[in-house]
Image (cartoon, helix red, strand yellow):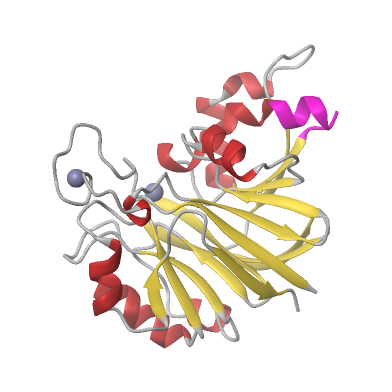
């Protein structure tokens, strides 16, 4: 069976353009240089899943006509990946069902603090979720009919979950990882990987590091996400190899659900 992944956003935490920035990329009229916060829409068969739900979610859902959400796969709880979560209320109301949410124990604990009102008993007018918590460092599980492999890595002190569905994998906000990640990625043809800028960063891969990572993973096609305003779409794509290119908002990748 085939699956489809749509980049809802490919921007770094503040998006591109940055508020009030006069740089060439922020002022660019090229649509590719307009980047909403990083997130993805995954469709397999009739089902519709989100990977993260950042502050631009409402705009992304309207733009792409996301009519239903059968599940949310959360990578971690930084603002740029979760701040749109209240807007999932429309789906729990319309679908008359709590939205299933897949997340790590760490993400669950953080959510329970910051979004304590989701957890109140009784009549609750907020978005409603049911939670499937991943306790292990890596594993395989069934999530709403989807066979999902997951793997954890670190971004500073934050534990982040990487997901694999068939020959597709989504790794965002990756900085420190164990070498076993490459066995997790074996056979992946479509890889979404985050990279912030050309210079090294303590929280993200640089472009060069992302290329080296993609090569080591052996992915046939890698598209970069979480890109900052230091990166001009066309300029970096000329420098990058053909198999590792910048993603952009609205780009679609087809993959095989093995
Ligand atoms: Zn981020
Ligand atoms: Zn700028």
* Residue 37, above or below 96: below
Residue at the extreme front: 29
* Quarter, ligand 2: top left
Q: Give the image location of residue 11, x and y in percent.
A: 37, 50
66 lies left or right of 152: right
Please count the marks in the image: 0
Res. 87 image quadrant: top right
Residue 78 seen by the camera: no
Residue 79 in sight here: yes
Say whether residue 159 is magenta: no
Q: Is residue 258 above or below residue 161?
A: below
**Residue 142 figure quarter:** bottom right
Horizontal and vertical percent for residue 189? Answer: 57, 82
Q: Is residue 92 magenta?
A: yes
Magenta segment:
90-98
Which quarter of the figure is the C terminus placed in? bottom right
Residue extending furthest toward the top? 123
Residue located at (28% from left, 59% from top): 196
**Side of 230 relative to 140 (left or right):** left
Judging depth in this view, the residue of 147 and 120 nearest the camera is 147
**Could you tell whether 239 is left or right of 171 in the image?**
left
Q: What residue is shown at x 14% (from left), y 46% (from top)?
A: 23
Q: Position of residue 115 (x, y in %)?
A: 56, 25
Rendered residue at 33%/84% (across/down): 241
- Percent of width and height locating residue 213: 37, 79
Q: Residue at x 68, y 26 (%)?
A: 89
The quadrant the N terminus occupies is: bottom right
Q: Nearer the viewer, residue 144 or 152?
A: 144
Please tell me whether residue 4 is drawn above or below residue 80 in the rendered image. Answer: below
């Amino acid at each position: 069976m085939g699956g489809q992944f749509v980049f809802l956003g490919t921007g770094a935490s503040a998006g591109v353009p940055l508020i009030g920035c006069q740089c060439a990329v922020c002022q660019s009229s090229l649509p590719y240089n307009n980047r909403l916060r990083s997130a993805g829409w995954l469709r397999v068969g009739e089902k519709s899943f989100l990977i993260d739900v950042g502050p631009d979610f409402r705009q992304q859902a309207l733009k792409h006509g996301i009519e239903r959400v059968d599940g949310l796969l959360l990578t971690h709880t930084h603002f740029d990946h979760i701040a749109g979560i209240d807007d999932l209320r429309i789906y729990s109301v319309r679908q008359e069902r709590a939205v299933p949410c897949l997340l790590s124990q760490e993400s669950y604990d953080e959510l329970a603090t910051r979004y304590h009102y989701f957890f109140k008993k009784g009549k609750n007018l907020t978005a409603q979720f049911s939670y499937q918590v991943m306790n292990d460092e890596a594993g395989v599980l069934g999530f709403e009919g989807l066979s999902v492999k997951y793997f954890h890595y670190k971004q500073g002190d934050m534990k982040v979950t990487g997901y694999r569905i068939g020959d597709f994998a989504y790794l965002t906000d990756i900085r420190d990882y164990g070498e076993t990640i490459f066995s997790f990625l074996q056979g992946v043809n479509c890889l979404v990987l985050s990279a912030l800028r050309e210079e090294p960063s303590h929280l993200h891969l640089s472009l060069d590091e992302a290329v080296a990572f993609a090569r080591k993973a052996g992915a046939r096609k890698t598209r970069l996400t979480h890109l900052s305003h230091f990166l001009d779409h066309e300029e970096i794509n000329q420098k990058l190899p053909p198999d590792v290119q910048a993603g952009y908002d609205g780009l679609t990748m087809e993959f095989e659900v093995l």
